[in-house]
Image (tube, rainbow, N blue to C red):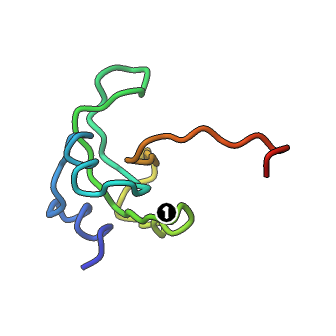
Amino acid sequence: MDAGSLAASGAAPRLTWVEICARFPGEWVSLIEADWVDDDYLDFRTAVVVKHSASYPDSFPEPDARWGTDEMMVHDFTGPIRPARPLYLR
């Protein structure tokens, strides 16, 4: 069963951001079913991880009709944010 099927079936665990970072350190994560703290959509209490990967492009799940048409997906990185190098140093 893939992550999307787990989330849709209710078998995927709801995790806090701290738990997500501990389980998937330094990876990109795609989250659904976020329990938002307020209407600004800046912070959530728990969410369901539907896909994760160290590679940014590989961390996006395939669309799944069972998620619903109004489902919001959060995509974020669990590791430290490194500043981008200026173009003249590349």
Q: Is residue 25 above or below residue 35?
A: below
| Residue drawn at point x = 32 percent, y = 67 percent | 4
Mark 1: few, some, or many residues within 10 Å (few <14, many ≥20)?
some
Find disc 1 in the rendering and name its residue: 60
Name the side, left or right, on which 53 lies relative to 4.
right
Q: Position of residue 6 (x, y in %)?
A: 22, 67
Q: Position of residue 1 (x, y in %)?
A: 24, 79
Name the side, left or right, on which 28 lies relative to 3.
right
Name the side, left or right, on which 30 lies relative to 82.
left
Secondary element under disc 1, as helix, strand or loop, is: loop
Considering every residue shown, the one lying at the far bottom of the view is 1
How many numbered marks does the figure carry? 1
Quarter of the figure with residue 9: bottom left
| Amino acid, disc 1 | Phe
Q: Position of residue 70 (x, y in %)?
A: 44, 46
Q: Is residue 42 above or below residue 18?
A: above
Considering every residue shown, the one lying at the far right of the view is 88
Depth check, front residue: 24 or 3: 24
Q: Position of residue 23 (x, y in %)?
A: 22, 56
| Residue drawn at point x = 43 percent, y = 45 percent | 74
| Residue drawn at point x = 37 percent, y = 64 percent | 51
| Residue drawn at point x = 38 percent, y = 47 percent | 78
